[in-house]
């Protein structure tokens, strides 16, 4: 049953990423063409987001196929770290694009204040572009989100893809609304900023988005650094293992939990209080894994037999 569920989740994830790949390629092509025709930095930025999305979805499909593979000679700890690496570098690539766009927008505004008038916008292609791309983003977000729910919300890749599609859609709608307002009020209250209205919109959207992707970057970096999982995960894990420990009769000395991609690794420091065989330890370890996975789907347990917690006492420490 576990293998069936894993295969099913992989198929759902792979299908969603295939849709993301081709959807982003279409939006990237549309954004770059429409941006050049309209002379709009906001539309070009939208297209560049989609181009990054295409490359990310292509890479994510390869990662997804092997992410549940167990340890081997090449990767003694398995392949779970690939997802955290992907999320971290996906977030940092988007942050880099945002910072580039912010710098470019500030430069355009500065040049305008200094007397340099940029080329005017061409509004003709914009209605078709914003309508088509907004609808595509909404479809991609809903497809990723519901697939993420079907996979029991275990895929950080799908969560990030859904968030990226949602943000891309918000950029499209906001840019369309802003450019529409500039067009409607170009001879009225917005007349002073019409020449750089496109850059103002890009600047505002990027500043709003930086915080979200910075959080994704910090989260992925924290997983790669081995930062402890949330207190909620720790409390859930303790409850899951309580029965096995009580039946065995030993003493739980310490427990550490780290999250790496969709895998939750539990290090259990345990004193059985009696001589035990390797077979008994293996049996207890497997029982703990089964119990942990009843509440934490992708949990793994490493049982360490010791009289001490995760850190050696100072009088015994070799450091």
Image (tube, rainbow, N blue to C red):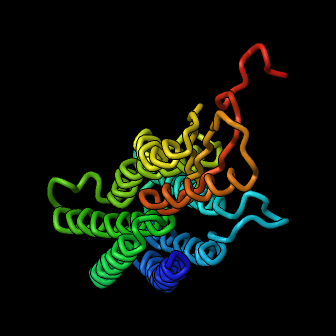
Q: Residue at x 47, y 47 (%)?
A: 237
Q: Residue at x 21, y 55 (%)?
A: 190
Question: Is 87 placed above or below 218 here?
Answer: below
Q: Position of residue 22 (x, y in %)?
A: 50, 86
Q: Position of residue 291 (x, y in %)?
A: 49, 57
Tell which of 135 and 110 is nearer to you.
Answer: 135
Q: Is residue 164 visible?
A: yes
Occupied quadrant, residue 186: bottom left
Question: Is 200 placed above or below 307 here?
Answer: below
Tell which of 184 and 151 is nearer to you.
Answer: 151
Report the number of discs.
Answer: 0
Q: Position of residue 223 (x, y in %)?
A: 59, 48
Tell which of 203 and 145 is nearer to you.
Answer: 145
Q: Is residue 115 visible?
A: no
Q: Residue at x 55, y 39 (%)?
A: 249
Residue sitting farthest toward the top: 315
Q: Residue at x 59, y 74 (%)?
A: 64
Q: Position of residue 149 (x, y in %)?
A: 36, 70
Question: Is 266 placed above or below 66 here?
Answer: above
Query: Quarter holding the C terminus?
Result: top right
Question: Is 273 placed above or below 115 here?
Answer: above
Occupied quadrant, residue 120: bottom left
């Amino acid at each position: 049953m576990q293998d069936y569920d894993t295969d099913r989740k992989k198929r759902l994830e792979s299908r969603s990423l295939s849709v993301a790949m081709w959807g982003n390629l279409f939006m990237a092509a549309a954004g770059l063409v429409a941006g050049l025709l309209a002379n709009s930095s906001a539309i070009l930025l939208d297209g560049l987001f989609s181009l990054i999305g295409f490359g990310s979805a292509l890479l994510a499909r390869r990662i997804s196929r092997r992410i549940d593979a167990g340890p081997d000679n090449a990767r003694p700890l398995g392949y779970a770290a690939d997802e955290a690496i992907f999320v971290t570098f996906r977030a940092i690539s988007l942050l880099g694009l945002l910072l580039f766009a912010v710098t470019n927008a500030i430069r355009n505004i500065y040049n305008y204040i200094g007397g340099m008038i940029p080329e005017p916008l061409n509004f003709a292609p914009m209605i078709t572009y914003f309508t088509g791309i907004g609808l595509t983003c909404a479809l991609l977000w809903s497809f990723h989100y519901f697939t993420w729910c079907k996979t029991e919300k275990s895929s950080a890749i799908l969560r990030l893809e859904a968030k990226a599609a949602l943000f891309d859609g918000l950029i499209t709608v906001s840019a369309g609304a802003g450019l529409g307002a500039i067009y409607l009020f170009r001879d009225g209250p917005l007349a002073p900023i019409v020449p750089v209205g496109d850059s103002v919109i890009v600047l505002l959207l990027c500043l709003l988005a930086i915080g979200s992707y910075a959080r994704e970057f910090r989260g992925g970096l924290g997983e790669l650094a081995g930062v402890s999982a949330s207190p909620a995960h720790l409390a859930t894990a303790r409850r899951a293992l309580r029965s096995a420990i009580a039946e065995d009769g030993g003493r739980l000395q310490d427990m550490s939990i780290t999250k790496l991609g969709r895998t939750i690794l539990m290090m259990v420091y345990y004193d059985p209080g009696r001589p035990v065989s390797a077979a008994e330890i293996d049996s207890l370890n497997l029982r703990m894994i089964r119990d942990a996975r009843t509440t934490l789907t992708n949990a793994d347990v490493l049982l360490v037999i010791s009289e001490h917690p995760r850190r050696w006492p100072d009088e015994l420490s070799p450091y």
